[in-house]
Amino acid sequence: MAGTHELIAAYWAAAEARDWAAFGDLIAENVVYEAPQTRERVRGRPAYLRFNLEGFPGPWHLSVRRIVAGERSAASWVEFSEPGDSYPGVCFFEIDQQGQIARITDFWPAPADLPAGRAHLVERY
């Protein structure tokens, strides 16, 4: 069994490579995926694989910025990009007893402008 950090790195690498067989090997048969912003939920490996394969066509890419992992949980910060657009995502993972990803909670925040009332409180980068 690989460590949690390596498991999540392999998950993102398989997604970037569109290696859906390797991707599927990393997730539990009864995986649950949720995206709170859109209130999407997908249950089970076959449905989650279909969600990724059919739901995200096109020339997109992922790059991992950071993975923080414990024994049975992890969080990752990734950058999703497609022609003309890119945005960060934060994803939380729960790992089952067999060392597979059992639950995924995905946050893909939309870019937003800085509210004028806070501009004097921050440094922009």
Image (cartoon, rainbow, N blue to C red):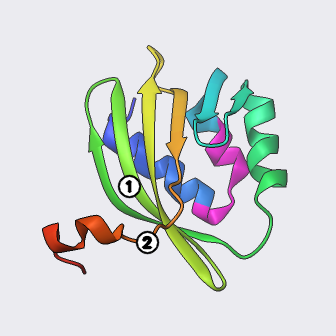
Does 36 appear above or below 85? above
The residue pinned by badge 1 equals 77
Q: Residue at x 14, y 67 (%)?
A: 121
Residue 116 is one of the magenta-drawn residues: no
Mark 2 residue element? loop
Residue 20 position in % (x across, y down): 71, 50
Query: Which residue type carries mark 2?
Result: Asp
Q: Which mark is residue 97?
A: none
Residue 51 position in % (x across, y down): 78, 43
Q: Using residue 59 as the reference point, say whether residue 35 is left or right of it.
A: left
Does 113 appear above or below 74? below
Q: Which residue in the rendered view is the most extreme toward the front?
A: 117
Residue in front for this viewpoint, 35 or 49: 35
Estimate how packed mark 1 is, as few (under 14), some (14 to 19) or many (20 or more) residues with alpha carbons within 10 Å: some
Residue 19 position in % (x across, y down): 68, 56
Query: Which residue type carries mark 1?
Result: Trp
Residue in front for this viewpoint, 95 or 116: 116
Q: Using residue 75 as the reference point, say whether residue 100 is left or right of it.
A: right
Q: Residue at x 67, y 34 (%)?
A: 39
Q: CA distance from mark 1 to mark 2?
A: 21 Å
Residue 114 position in % (x across, y down): 36, 70
Residue interval drawn in magenta: 16-24
Q: Residue at x 54, y 61 (%)?
A: 110
For the C terminus, give its image quadrant. Answer: bottom left
The residue pinned by badge 2 equals 113
Q: Main secondary structure of the magenta part?
A: helix
For the N terminus, give its image quadrant. Answer: top left
Mark 1 residue element? strand
Mark with earlier residue (1, 2): 1
